[in-house]
Amino acid sequence: MVQNKIQAKMLFLKGVENEQNGKLDEAIHFYRRAVQLVPDIEFRLYDASKLKPRERHEIDNSADDLEVGHDQEVDSGSEDDDDDDSDTDLLSHLQRLFSRSMCVCTPHHEQKATHISALPMEIILYILRWVVSSDLDLRSLEMCSHVCRGFYLCSRDPEIWRLACARVWGVNCGGLTPYESWRKMFIERPRLHFNGCYISKTTYVRSGENNFQDHFYRPWHVVEYYRYLRFFPEGLVLMLTTPDDPLSSLGQLRHRIPKNPAMLSGHYCLLEDRVVLVLHRQDSAVKMAVNNRNRGRRREGTQDLGEQTFHMELQIVTYRNRIHAQLVWQRYSVFTRFRNGQENTTTFDLPRNRYPPYWFSRVKSYTAESENPL
């Protein structure tokens, strides 16, 4: 009788492992054999997973002793395999441990309160979707994977990474080929970062006016200003050009609807390793400019600035160990429509000294709260 229970447990755990690997036919075969030996084997294993940590540890050790012969057979057939793919080996090893314990994690100390390990796997995965949030904070998900081996498995759930890839690339996401997994696609495929801001610092020297007392003295001014780009997963982009340093400027880019009238807003499109931006001034800024022009009609020579639309194309570049952390200028033009109906397009040359690249910088306040799950 005891031998039947042990054999039924081994068959049921093999069925669980095959089901997790997508081999449903083999899993059903092992389930049937286990139920024929012990009809209530599933309830017995579920009750065993709810035991105290010390008792569960003893059960796991006994299961390890029973599977020594099986592990030796597997190892003898793969002596020539190398250990380069350590992440895959670790993931498969933790999946085998999880199939034995049937529990995400265990409390280190006995406690009367309900532990998080009592939650079903579906609830924990939903919590992790809130951790990632609609702003795609995958860095926080990776930090959750450091908690324990159960959270490591949950953070590698393919569905979470598939949803993240679909949110980044949309209809252009395609299939997994040539990537091994959705997580590999999200890491290796050129993309934008959403948990921070891209910053470009420009510095140049400008000559000043002669001194009225000394005509041989001409001052020189060092001009320094910043360009900021903030991307959102739904295709919205904000751009701010200001002489203020990042410490005082990054907070203005936190919300999707900015309060600063000098900020440009628009949309972007991701095309392989290029990102195309179309920006325009806010309605409040346009109305303010129209009012200023109306006040200056009495003055002669008032210039019609028109409505401007900015077109930019940037290339996503990996610099050393910083993946997708740099945006390099490729094209920049301004389309202007005047009040009299005339249109004008100005295209700028892009020398590297005048248009330095954007560098990504993570901003903690951007992902401090989650408004919607992934």
Image: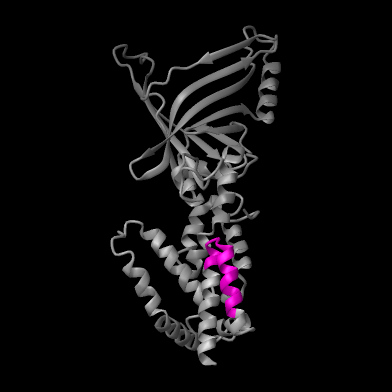
Magenta region's main secondary structure?
helix
Q: Quadrant of residue 32?
A: bottom right
Measured along the vertical axis of the image, is residue 217 above or below residue 11? above
Residue 114 seen in the current view: no
Residue 248 versus residue 43: which sits nearer the camera?
A: 43
Q: Residue furthest bottom?
A: 1
Residue 207 versus residue 368: which sits nearer the camera?
A: 368
Report the side of 70 relative to 4 (left or right).
Answer: left
Q: Residue at x 50, y 57 (%)?
A: 140
Q: Count up the numbered dots.
A: 0
Report the side of 283 relative to 151 (left or right).
Answer: right
Q: How is colour applied across the structure in the image?
A: one colour
Highlighted magenta segment, given as a residue range: 18-34
- Residue 24 image point, x, y percent: 58, 63
- Residue 46 image point, x, y percent: 60, 81
In the rendered structure, does residue 22 fall within the stretch colored magenta? yes
In the rendered structure, does residue 129 fall within the stretch colored magenta? no
Location of the N terminus by quadrant is bottom right
Q: Residue at x 57, y 82 (%)?
A: 45
Q: Residue at x 51, y 61 (%)?
A: 155
Measured along the vertical axis of the image, is residue 8 above or below residue 355? below
Measured along the vertical axis of the image, is residue 343 above or below residue 57? above
Q: Quadrant of residue 341?
A: top right
Residue 139 seen in the current view: yes
- Residue 252 image point, x, y percent: 57, 42
